[in-house]
Amino acid sequence: MRLGDALREMEVEEGPEGVRVRVDDRWHTISLKQIGHTGLYSLIVDDHPYEFFAEQRSGGFDIVIGSRAYSVLLEGRGRRVTPLPAAALEAEAQPAEWLVLSPMMGVVRQINVSAGDTVKAGDVLLVLEAMKMNNDLKAQRSGRVEEVYVSLGERVEGGRPLLRLTQD
């Protein structure tokens, strides 16, 4: 598996105490639970919690942790992770397509874009109300809106895809 610029060996095993993952020579205890019927997951690694969004695709998964996206390729029928070739990693640094995920649970109060619209970095894409506060979700880079997955007044969970954009 490739973590940043480093190539790491990884192994997964299930035992009586649950699932363990070995990265290089160190074993970690993990627990993974899907949140609802979404692509949002809760991962606990050595008692440290993390949330991420995962979507299965041919040969692996696309994973979003915070605002960073990763591709995981699975090798054969096992659980070994194959590193991406260097050219693929460079292409992934600026993906041609990306999802805007809800950073929290809330209600969509305003949608400022439609499919086909061009946006610039910093443009407010939509407004999400959470705990009686309006939160502007802004474009992180320029691009074109391909799909809007939500509607006005809709309640969304954290990690839910809101929009799909492509590089302009």
Image (tube, rainbow, N blue to C red):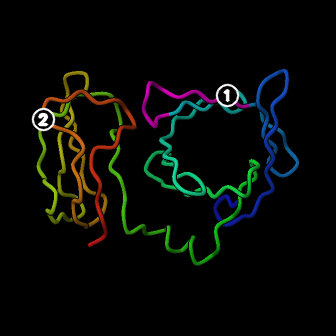
* Image coordinates for residue 70, horizontal then vertical, percent: 54, 56
Q: Outermost residue toward the right?
A: 25
Which secondary structure lies at badge 1?
A: strand
The vertical placement of 97 against 130, above or below, is: below
Check residue 102 for magenta coloring. Answer: no
Q: Quadrant of the N terminus?
A: bottom right
Query: Residue at (56%, 34%) from the top-left corner?
Result: 50
The picture quadrant where one finds residue 36 is top left
Total numbered labels: 2
Q: Nearer the viewer, residue 167 or 49?
A: 167
Q: Which mark is residue 153?
A: none
Left or right position of 106 against 73: left
* Image coordinates for residue 135, horizontal then vertical, percent: 22, 37
Residue annotated with mark 2: 152
The picture quadrant where one finds residue 33 is top right
The vertical placement of 158 against 162, above or below, is: above
Q: Where are the magenta residues, as a range?
A: 30-40
Which secondary structure lies at badge 2?
A: loop
Looking at the rendered structure, the kind of residue marked 2 is Leu
Q: What's the distance in space between the residues labelled 1 and 2, CA to CA?
A: 35 Å
Residue annotated with mark 1: 31
Looking at the rendered structure, the kind of residue marked 1 is Ser
* Image coordinates for residue 131, horizontal then vertical, percent: 25, 22
Query: Residue at (82%, 21%) from the top-left corner?
Result: 17
Task: Assess disc 2: are there few (<14), some (14-19) or many (≥20) residues with their C-alpha within 10 Å of its C-alpha.
Answer: few
The vertical placement of 25 against 8, above or below, is: above
Left or right position of 121 against 79: left
Question: Which badge, 1 or 2, comes first in the chain's sequence?
Answer: 1
Task: Assess disc 1: are there few (<14), some (14-19) or many (≥20) residues with their C-alpha within 10 Å of its C-alpha.
Answer: some
Check residue 36 for magenta coloring. Answer: yes
